[in-house]
Amino acid sequence: MSESKFGERGLEQLKLDARVILDSALDAVDPCKAVHLHVTREGYFLKVDSHRYDLREIGRVIVVGAGKASARMAVAIEEILGDFISDGLINVKYGHGEPLKKITVWEAGHPVPDQSGIEGTRRLLTFVEDARENDLVISLISGGGSSLLPLPASGIDLQAKQETTQALLQSGATIHQVNAVRKHISGVKGGRLAEAAAPARVVTLLLSDVIGDDLDVIASGPTVPDTTTFATALDVLTLYNLTGHVPGNVLSHLEAGARGEKPETPKPGDPVFRNVVNVIVANNASAIQAAADKAKSLGYTPLVLSSVVQGEAREVGRVMAAIAREISMTGRPVASPACVIAGGETTVTLKGKGVGGRNQELALAASLDLENTDNILLLAAGTDGTDGPTDAAGAIVSGNTLSVARQLGLSARDYLNNNDSYHFFQSTGDLVMTGPTGTNVMDIILLLAG
Protein backbone atom coordinates (compact mmCIF):
# COMPACT_ATOMS: atom_id res chain seq x y z
CA MET A 1 0.00 0.00 0.00
CA SER A 2 1.52 3.29 -1.06
CA GLU A 3 2.41 6.05 1.39
CA SER A 4 0.29 8.59 -0.50
CA LYS A 5 -2.88 6.52 -0.15
CA PHE A 6 -2.73 7.17 3.59
CA GLY A 7 -1.68 10.80 3.48
CA GLU A 8 1.49 12.36 4.77
CA ARG A 9 1.60 10.36 7.97
CA GLY A 10 1.31 6.97 6.30
CA LEU A 11 -0.39 3.88 7.67
CA GLU A 12 2.69 2.64 9.48
CA GLN A 13 3.06 6.00 11.23
CA LEU A 14 -0.59 5.85 12.27
CA LYS A 15 0.05 2.42 13.79
CA LEU A 16 3.08 3.71 15.68
CA ASP A 17 1.15 6.73 16.92
CA ALA A 18 -1.77 4.57 18.05
CA ARG A 19 0.53 2.39 20.15
CA VAL A 20 2.23 5.42 21.70
CA ILE A 21 -1.17 6.87 22.62
CA LEU A 22 -2.31 3.53 24.05
CA ASP A 23 0.88 3.19 26.10
CA SER A 24 0.39 6.67 27.55
CA ALA A 25 -3.14 5.77 28.57
CA LEU A 26 -1.93 2.59 30.27
CA ASP A 27 0.84 4.44 32.09
CA ALA A 28 -1.69 6.93 33.47
CA VAL A 29 -3.66 4.13 35.16
CA ASP A 30 -0.71 2.16 36.47
CA PRO A 31 -2.09 0.82 39.77
CA CYS A 32 1.09 1.53 41.71
CA LYS A 33 1.13 5.18 40.62
CA ALA A 34 -2.61 5.50 41.19
CA VAL A 35 -2.38 4.26 44.79
CA HIS A 36 0.48 6.66 45.53
CA LEU A 37 -1.68 9.55 44.32
CA HIS A 38 -4.37 8.75 46.88
CA VAL A 39 -2.45 7.21 49.77
CA THR A 40 0.46 8.83 51.63
CA ARG A 41 2.22 8.40 54.97
CA GLU A 42 4.09 10.89 57.11
CA GLY A 43 5.59 9.14 60.09
CA TYR A 44 2.77 7.45 61.97
CA PHE A 45 0.03 9.21 60.03
CA LEU A 46 -1.57 7.42 57.09
CA LYS A 47 -3.70 9.57 54.80
CA VAL A 48 -6.19 8.14 52.30
CA ASP A 49 -7.66 11.10 50.45
CA SER A 50 -9.38 13.07 53.22
CA HIS A 51 -9.28 10.21 55.74
CA ARG A 52 -6.46 10.11 58.31
CA TYR A 53 -5.31 7.22 60.50
CA ASP A 54 -2.82 7.35 63.38
CA LEU A 55 -0.92 4.09 63.07
CA ARG A 56 -0.03 4.24 66.77
CA GLU A 57 -3.71 3.64 67.49
CA ILE A 58 -3.92 0.72 65.07
CA GLY A 59 -3.44 -2.79 66.38
CA ARG A 60 -2.62 -4.57 63.15
CA VAL A 61 -2.65 -3.59 59.48
CA ILE A 62 -4.00 -6.43 57.36
CA VAL A 63 -3.90 -6.21 53.55
CA VAL A 64 -6.22 -8.32 51.42
CA GLY A 65 -7.53 -8.04 47.91
CA ALA A 66 -8.40 -9.53 44.57
CA GLY A 67 -8.22 -8.59 40.91
CA LYS A 68 -5.90 -8.47 37.94
CA ALA A 69 -4.39 -5.19 39.14
CA SER A 70 -4.25 -5.96 42.85
CA ALA A 71 -0.60 -7.05 42.76
CA ARG A 72 0.57 -3.66 41.44
CA MET A 73 -1.65 -1.98 44.03
CA ALA A 74 -0.02 -4.11 46.73
CA VAL A 75 3.43 -3.02 45.59
CA ALA A 76 2.47 0.58 46.36
CA ILE A 77 0.95 -0.30 49.74
CA GLU A 78 4.14 -2.09 50.75
CA GLU A 79 6.19 0.91 49.64
CA ILE A 80 3.98 3.22 51.72
CA LEU A 81 3.50 1.12 54.86
CA GLY A 82 6.47 -1.25 54.92
CA ASP A 83 6.81 -2.97 58.30
CA PHE A 84 3.53 -1.49 59.55
CA ILE A 85 1.87 -4.30 57.59
CA SER A 86 1.19 -7.30 59.82
CA ASP A 87 0.04 -9.79 57.21
CA GLY A 88 -2.08 -10.21 54.13
CA LEU A 89 -3.03 -12.08 50.97
CA ILE A 90 -4.24 -11.07 47.52
CA ASN A 91 -5.78 -13.23 44.80
CA VAL A 92 -4.50 -12.47 41.29
CA LYS A 93 -4.93 -13.98 37.85
CA TYR A 94 -2.34 -16.57 36.84
CA GLY A 95 0.73 -14.74 35.56
CA HIS A 96 -0.28 -11.36 37.00
CA GLY A 97 1.68 -11.55 40.25
CA GLU A 98 4.42 -9.26 41.58
CA PRO A 99 7.22 -9.97 44.08
CA LEU A 100 6.01 -8.79 47.50
CA LYS A 101 7.62 -8.90 50.95
CA LYS A 102 4.77 -8.81 53.48
CA ILE A 103 1.73 -9.83 51.44
CA THR A 104 1.17 -13.31 50.01
CA VAL A 105 0.33 -13.47 46.31
CA TRP A 106 -2.15 -16.22 45.47
CA GLU A 107 -2.79 -17.03 41.79
CA ALA A 108 -6.16 -18.25 40.57
CA GLY A 109 -8.46 -18.56 37.55
CA HIS A 110 -10.10 -15.77 35.56
CA PRO A 111 -12.66 -15.15 34.04
CA VAL A 112 -14.04 -18.47 35.26
CA PRO A 113 -13.30 -19.14 38.96
CA ASP A 114 -11.37 -22.24 39.96
CA GLN A 115 -10.54 -24.24 43.08
CA SER A 116 -7.36 -22.25 43.67
CA GLY A 117 -9.45 -19.10 43.86
CA ILE A 118 -11.72 -20.66 46.46
CA GLU A 119 -8.75 -21.75 48.57
CA GLY A 120 -7.17 -18.30 48.31
CA THR A 121 -10.45 -16.64 49.33
CA ARG A 122 -10.81 -18.90 52.36
CA ARG A 123 -7.26 -18.06 53.46
CA LEU A 124 -7.92 -14.37 52.90
CA LEU A 125 -11.08 -14.58 55.01
CA THR A 126 -9.17 -16.04 57.96
CA PHE A 127 -7.22 -12.76 58.16
CA VAL A 128 -10.36 -10.64 57.82
CA GLU A 129 -12.50 -12.57 60.29
CA ASP A 130 -9.69 -12.40 62.85
CA ALA A 131 -9.56 -8.58 62.68
CA ARG A 132 -10.42 -6.71 65.88
CA GLU A 133 -12.02 -3.31 66.40
CA ASN A 134 -8.69 -1.45 66.56
CA ASP A 135 -7.26 -3.18 63.46
CA LEU A 136 -7.12 -1.70 59.97
CA VAL A 137 -8.02 -3.88 56.99
CA ILE A 138 -6.81 -2.48 53.68
CA SER A 139 -8.66 -4.06 50.77
CA LEU A 140 -7.23 -3.78 47.24
CA ILE A 141 -9.89 -4.42 44.61
CA SER A 142 -9.72 -4.24 40.83
CA GLY A 143 -11.37 -5.66 37.74
CA GLY A 144 -11.40 -9.43 37.72
CA GLY A 145 -12.11 -9.50 41.43
CA SER A 146 -15.48 -11.16 40.94
CA SER A 147 -13.82 -14.27 39.50
CA LEU A 148 -10.74 -14.07 41.72
CA LEU A 149 -12.67 -13.81 45.00
CA PRO A 150 -14.90 -16.88 44.72
CA LEU A 151 -16.65 -18.45 47.69
CA PRO A 152 -19.82 -20.26 46.61
CA ALA A 153 -22.80 -19.82 48.92
CA SER A 154 -23.88 -22.81 50.99
CA GLY A 155 -25.36 -25.53 48.80
CA ILE A 156 -23.57 -24.34 45.65
CA ASP A 157 -20.38 -26.04 44.47
CA LEU A 158 -17.57 -24.77 42.26
CA GLN A 159 -18.86 -26.47 39.12
CA ALA A 160 -22.27 -24.84 39.52
CA LYS A 161 -20.61 -21.45 39.99
CA GLN A 162 -18.42 -22.03 36.90
CA GLU A 163 -21.36 -23.05 34.73
CA THR A 164 -23.38 -20.05 35.86
CA THR A 165 -20.49 -17.67 35.21
CA GLN A 166 -19.95 -19.12 31.72
CA ALA A 167 -23.64 -18.87 30.87
CA LEU A 168 -23.77 -15.23 31.98
CA LEU A 169 -20.59 -14.25 30.13
CA GLN A 170 -21.86 -15.81 26.90
CA SER A 171 -25.36 -14.32 27.15
CA GLY A 172 -24.50 -10.72 26.33
CA ALA A 173 -25.47 -9.55 29.83
CA THR A 174 -23.83 -6.36 31.11
CA ILE A 175 -21.32 -6.51 33.94
CA HIS A 176 -23.93 -4.92 36.23
CA GLN A 177 -26.32 -7.77 35.49
CA VAL A 178 -23.65 -10.48 35.71
CA ASN A 179 -22.50 -9.22 39.09
CA ALA A 180 -26.04 -9.00 40.46
CA VAL A 181 -26.19 -12.78 40.08
CA ARG A 182 -22.63 -13.35 41.29
CA LYS A 183 -23.32 -11.45 44.52
CA HIS A 184 -26.27 -13.67 45.38
CA ILE A 185 -24.52 -17.00 44.92
CA SER A 186 -21.45 -15.90 46.91
CA GLY A 187 -20.42 -15.91 50.54
CA VAL A 188 -18.08 -12.92 50.23
CA LYS A 189 -19.37 -10.52 47.54
CA GLY A 190 -22.06 -7.86 47.84
CA GLY A 191 -20.70 -6.34 51.06
CA ARG A 192 -20.06 -9.62 52.82
CA LEU A 193 -16.30 -9.03 53.07
CA ALA A 194 -17.03 -5.87 55.07
CA GLU A 195 -19.49 -7.89 57.13
CA ALA A 196 -16.75 -10.40 57.92
CA ALA A 197 -14.29 -7.63 58.88
CA ALA A 198 -16.68 -5.68 61.15
CA PRO A 199 -16.13 -3.95 63.53
CA ALA A 200 -12.57 -3.36 62.26
CA ARG A 201 -11.79 -0.28 60.20
CA VAL A 202 -11.75 -1.04 56.47
CA VAL A 203 -10.18 1.02 53.69
CA THR A 204 -10.87 -0.29 50.18
CA LEU A 205 -8.90 1.07 47.23
CA LEU A 206 -10.60 0.37 43.93
CA LEU A 207 -9.43 0.39 40.34
CA SER A 208 -12.69 0.74 38.45
CA ASP A 209 -13.45 -1.48 35.46
CA VAL A 210 -17.19 -0.87 35.25
CA ILE A 211 -19.41 1.59 33.43
CA GLY A 212 -20.22 4.54 35.66
CA ASP A 213 -17.72 3.48 38.38
CA ASP A 214 -20.55 1.99 40.47
CA LEU A 215 -18.84 0.88 43.69
CA ASP A 216 -21.18 -2.04 44.29
CA VAL A 217 -20.42 -3.46 40.83
CA ILE A 218 -16.59 -3.30 40.85
CA ALA A 219 -15.56 -6.89 41.65
CA SER A 220 -19.16 -7.36 42.84
CA GLY A 221 -18.65 -4.88 45.70
CA PRO A 222 -17.17 -7.00 48.53
CA THR A 223 -17.02 -3.99 50.91
CA VAL A 224 -19.90 -1.94 49.48
CA PRO A 225 -23.63 -1.96 50.37
CA ASP A 226 -25.50 -4.01 47.81
CA THR A 227 -28.32 -2.30 45.92
CA THR A 228 -29.48 -5.51 44.20
CA THR A 229 -31.55 -8.39 45.56
CA PHE A 230 -32.22 -12.07 44.96
CA ALA A 231 -35.18 -10.95 42.86
CA THR A 232 -32.83 -8.82 40.75
CA ALA A 233 -30.64 -11.86 40.10
CA LEU A 234 -33.66 -13.94 39.03
CA ASP A 235 -34.78 -11.15 36.71
CA VAL A 236 -31.39 -11.24 34.96
CA LEU A 237 -31.66 -15.00 34.37
CA THR A 238 -35.17 -14.56 33.02
CA LEU A 239 -34.22 -11.65 30.75
CA TYR A 240 -31.49 -13.69 29.05
CA ASN A 241 -33.45 -16.97 29.03
CA LEU A 242 -30.96 -18.62 31.37
CA THR A 243 -33.29 -20.12 33.97
CA GLY A 244 -33.10 -23.46 32.16
CA HIS A 245 -29.37 -23.18 31.50
CA VAL A 246 -27.95 -22.68 35.00
CA PRO A 247 -27.55 -25.53 37.51
CA GLY A 248 -30.64 -26.41 39.51
CA ASN A 249 -28.98 -25.69 42.87
CA VAL A 250 -28.18 -22.14 41.73
CA LEU A 251 -31.76 -21.50 40.60
CA SER A 252 -33.24 -23.00 43.78
CA HIS A 253 -30.86 -20.93 45.93
CA LEU A 254 -31.90 -17.70 44.21
CA GLU A 255 -35.60 -18.61 44.42
CA ALA A 256 -35.27 -19.40 48.13
CA GLY A 257 -33.56 -16.06 48.66
CA ALA A 258 -36.33 -14.24 46.81
CA ARG A 259 -38.85 -15.90 49.15
CA GLY A 260 -36.90 -14.60 52.15
CA GLU A 261 -35.54 -18.00 53.14
CA LYS A 262 -31.88 -16.94 52.64
CA PRO A 263 -30.22 -13.90 54.22
CA GLU A 264 -29.92 -10.95 51.83
CA THR A 265 -26.64 -9.18 51.17
CA PRO A 266 -26.07 -6.19 53.51
CA LYS A 267 -27.80 -3.06 52.25
CA PRO A 268 -27.16 0.71 52.54
CA GLY A 269 -27.43 1.79 56.17
CA ASP A 270 -26.29 -1.54 57.58
CA PRO A 271 -23.99 -0.94 60.61
CA VAL A 272 -21.32 -3.25 59.14
CA PHE A 273 -20.34 -0.33 56.88
CA ARG A 274 -19.95 2.20 59.70
CA ASN A 275 -16.13 2.03 59.61
CA VAL A 276 -15.72 1.33 55.89
CA VAL A 277 -14.15 3.78 53.40
CA ASN A 278 -14.18 3.05 49.64
CA VAL A 279 -11.92 5.10 47.34
CA ILE A 280 -11.58 4.87 43.54
CA VAL A 281 -7.92 5.45 42.67
CA ALA A 282 -8.16 5.20 38.85
CA ASN A 283 -10.76 4.61 36.15
CA ASN A 284 -11.34 4.61 32.41
CA ALA A 285 -11.76 8.39 32.33
CA SER A 286 -8.20 8.75 33.66
CA ALA A 287 -6.90 6.60 30.82
CA ILE A 288 -8.73 8.34 27.99
CA GLN A 289 -7.74 11.80 29.26
CA ALA A 290 -4.09 10.70 29.13
CA ALA A 291 -4.70 9.35 25.62
CA ALA A 292 -6.14 12.71 24.56
CA ASP A 293 -3.16 14.57 26.01
CA LYS A 294 -0.67 12.33 24.19
CA ALA A 295 -2.59 12.56 20.90
CA LYS A 296 -2.49 16.35 21.11
CA SER A 297 1.27 16.30 21.73
CA LEU A 298 1.66 14.18 18.56
CA GLY A 299 -0.16 16.77 16.47
CA TYR A 300 -3.67 15.30 16.41
CA THR A 301 -6.83 17.12 17.43
CA PRO A 302 -8.27 14.88 20.15
CA LEU A 303 -12.01 14.31 20.58
CA VAL A 304 -13.20 12.28 23.55
CA LEU A 305 -16.54 10.67 22.73
CA SER A 306 -17.32 8.87 25.97
CA SER A 307 -15.88 6.79 28.81
CA VAL A 308 -19.12 4.82 29.22
CA VAL A 309 -19.49 3.06 25.85
CA GLN A 310 -21.38 -0.23 26.07
CA GLY A 311 -23.50 -2.50 23.90
CA GLU A 312 -22.76 -5.25 21.39
CA ALA A 313 -19.12 -5.04 20.31
CA ARG A 314 -19.86 -5.44 16.61
CA GLU A 315 -22.47 -2.67 16.69
CA VAL A 316 -20.11 -0.29 18.46
CA GLY A 317 -17.49 -1.17 15.84
CA ARG A 318 -19.86 -0.16 13.06
CA VAL A 319 -20.64 3.15 14.80
CA MET A 320 -16.92 3.92 15.12
CA ALA A 321 -16.46 3.09 11.43
CA ALA A 322 -19.32 5.45 10.56
CA ILE A 323 -17.61 8.25 12.47
CA ALA A 324 -14.40 7.50 10.57
CA ARG A 325 -16.18 7.76 7.24
CA GLU A 326 -17.82 11.03 8.28
CA ILE A 327 -14.42 12.49 9.16
CA SER A 328 -13.08 11.31 5.80
CA MET A 329 -15.98 12.81 3.82
CA THR A 330 -16.80 16.03 5.69
CA GLY A 331 -14.27 16.69 8.41
CA ARG A 332 -16.99 16.26 11.06
CA PRO A 333 -17.13 15.92 14.02
CA VAL A 334 -13.43 16.83 13.99
CA ALA A 335 -11.09 17.58 11.11
CA SER A 336 -7.96 15.58 10.31
CA PRO A 337 -5.45 15.00 11.70
CA ALA A 338 -7.73 13.75 14.46
CA CYS A 339 -7.78 11.20 17.25
CA VAL A 340 -11.26 10.17 18.36
CA ILE A 341 -11.18 8.37 21.71
CA ALA A 342 -13.79 6.24 23.45
CA GLY A 343 -13.72 4.01 26.49
CA GLY A 344 -16.01 1.58 28.25
CA GLU A 345 -16.83 -2.09 27.94
CA THR A 346 -18.81 -3.77 25.21
CA THR A 347 -20.29 -7.26 25.23
CA VAL A 348 -20.32 -10.19 22.83
CA THR A 349 -23.25 -12.54 22.38
CA LEU A 350 -21.58 -15.79 21.38
CA LYS A 351 -23.16 -17.67 18.48
CA GLY A 352 -20.11 -19.19 16.82
CA LYS A 353 -17.41 -21.52 18.09
CA GLY A 354 -14.36 -19.37 17.40
CA VAL A 355 -11.93 -17.60 19.73
CA GLY A 356 -11.71 -13.89 20.36
CA GLY A 357 -12.54 -11.01 22.66
CA ARG A 358 -14.84 -8.01 22.59
CA ASN A 359 -12.15 -5.64 21.29
CA GLN A 360 -11.10 -7.97 18.49
CA GLU A 361 -14.75 -8.48 17.54
CA LEU A 362 -15.33 -4.72 17.58
CA ALA A 363 -12.33 -4.15 15.31
CA LEU A 364 -13.31 -6.94 12.92
CA ALA A 365 -16.84 -5.55 12.57
CA ALA A 366 -15.43 -2.07 11.96
CA SER A 367 -13.15 -3.37 9.21
CA LEU A 368 -16.20 -4.33 7.10
CA ASP A 369 -17.32 -0.69 7.00
CA LEU A 370 -13.85 0.84 6.74
CA GLU A 371 -13.01 -0.83 3.44
CA ASN A 372 -11.47 1.57 0.91
CA THR A 373 -11.25 4.47 3.38
CA ASP A 374 -7.94 6.33 3.24
CA ASN A 375 -5.79 7.50 6.10
CA ILE A 376 -8.00 5.89 8.80
CA LEU A 377 -6.96 3.48 11.53
CA LEU A 378 -8.89 1.98 14.45
CA LEU A 379 -7.34 0.34 17.50
CA ALA A 380 -9.43 -1.36 20.20
CA ALA A 381 -7.77 -2.87 23.25
CA GLY A 382 -8.40 -4.02 26.79
CA THR A 383 -6.31 -2.12 29.31
CA ASP A 384 -5.47 -5.33 31.18
CA GLY A 385 -3.63 -6.73 28.16
CA THR A 386 -5.97 -9.68 27.68
CA ASP A 387 -9.04 -9.57 25.47
CA GLY A 388 -11.39 -12.43 26.22
CA PRO A 389 -9.71 -15.84 26.58
CA THR A 390 -6.76 -14.79 24.40
CA ASP A 391 -3.20 -13.53 24.84
CA ALA A 392 -3.95 -10.38 22.80
CA ALA A 393 -5.14 -7.04 24.16
CA GLY A 394 -7.11 -6.26 21.00
CA ALA A 395 -6.59 -5.49 17.32
CA ILE A 396 -5.91 -2.78 14.72
CA VAL A 397 -7.81 -2.31 11.45
CA SER A 398 -7.69 0.14 8.57
CA GLY A 399 -9.13 0.66 5.10
CA ASN A 400 -6.93 -2.07 3.62
CA THR A 401 -7.59 -4.79 6.22
CA LEU A 402 -10.10 -6.63 4.02
CA SER A 403 -7.78 -6.40 1.00
CA VAL A 404 -4.99 -8.06 2.96
CA ALA A 405 -7.43 -10.70 4.23
CA ARG A 406 -8.59 -11.59 0.72
CA GLN A 407 -5.01 -12.06 -0.39
CA LEU A 408 -4.74 -14.60 2.44
CA GLY A 409 -7.99 -16.29 1.44
CA LEU A 410 -9.84 -15.06 4.53
CA SER A 411 -13.46 -13.90 4.72
CA ALA A 412 -13.81 -11.29 7.48
CA ARG A 413 -17.59 -11.78 7.58
CA ASP A 414 -17.28 -15.55 8.03
CA TYR A 415 -14.80 -15.09 10.88
CA LEU A 416 -17.09 -12.52 12.50
CA ASN A 417 -20.11 -14.81 12.24
CA ASN A 418 -18.09 -17.54 13.95
CA ASN A 419 -16.86 -15.17 16.70
CA ASP A 420 -13.35 -16.09 15.58
CA SER A 421 -11.71 -12.65 15.47
CA TYR A 422 -8.51 -13.86 17.14
CA HIS A 423 -7.55 -16.27 14.38
CA PHE A 424 -8.45 -13.69 11.72
CA PHE A 425 -6.11 -11.08 13.18
CA GLN A 426 -3.48 -13.67 13.99
CA SER A 427 -3.35 -14.43 10.27
CA THR A 428 -3.27 -10.77 9.17
CA GLY A 429 -0.72 -9.80 11.81
CA ASP A 430 -2.94 -7.13 13.34
CA LEU A 431 -3.28 -8.33 16.94
CA VAL A 432 -2.33 -5.81 19.63
CA MET A 433 0.03 -7.64 22.00
CA THR A 434 0.96 -5.92 25.26
CA GLY A 435 1.26 -8.81 27.70
CA PRO A 436 -0.22 -8.40 31.20
CA THR A 437 -0.26 -4.66 31.93
CA GLY A 438 -0.89 -4.85 35.66
CA THR A 439 -3.92 -2.58 35.35
CA ASN A 440 -7.58 -2.96 34.39
CA VAL A 441 -9.90 -0.02 33.62
CA MET A 442 -12.04 -1.51 30.86
CA ASP A 443 -11.26 -0.81 27.18
CA ILE A 444 -9.91 1.95 24.95
CA ILE A 445 -10.89 2.60 21.33
CA LEU A 446 -8.71 4.90 19.26
CA LEU A 447 -9.75 6.21 15.84
CA LEU A 448 -6.94 8.01 14.01
CA ALA A 449 -7.47 10.11 10.88
CA GLY A 450 -4.02 11.05 9.71
Image (cartoon, rainbow, N blue to C red):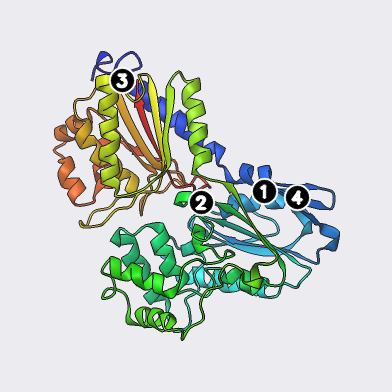
Where disc 2 sits, the SS reads: helix
Identify the mark at residue 172; answer none if there is no mark: none
The amino acid at mark 3 is Gly
Work out whether mark 3 precedes mark 4 in sequence or the reverse, and give the earlier one: 4
The amino acid at mark 1 is Ala
Residue 136 in the image, given as x and y percentages of width and height = 73, 64
Name the residue tied to disc 3.
Answer: 331
Marks 3 and 2, Cα distance to the nearest angstrom?
33 Å
The residue that appears at 30% across and 15% down in the rendered structure is: 7
Marks 3 and 4, Cα distance to the nearest angstrom?
48 Å
Q: Are marks 2 and 4 in contact (CB under 8 Å)?
A: no
In the image shown, does 259 or 160 lie closer to the viewer?
259
Work out whether mark 3 precedes mark 2 in sequence or the reverse, and give the earlier one: 2
Name the residue tied to disc 1.
Answer: 76
Comparing marks 2 and 4, which lies closer to the viewer?
Answer: 2
Tell me if mark 1 has few (under 14), some (14-19) or many (20+) residues whose alpha carbon lies within 10 angstroms of its own: some
Identify the mark at residue 47; answer none if there is no mark: 4
- Locate residue 130: give its quadrant: bottom right
Q: Name the image quarter holding the C terminus.
A: top left
Q: How many marks?
A: 4
Name the residue tied to disc 2.
Answer: 213
The amino acid at mark 4 is Lys
- Taking the image as shown, residue 27 lies to the left or right of residue 112, namely right
Is residue 317 at least partly visible in the picture? yes
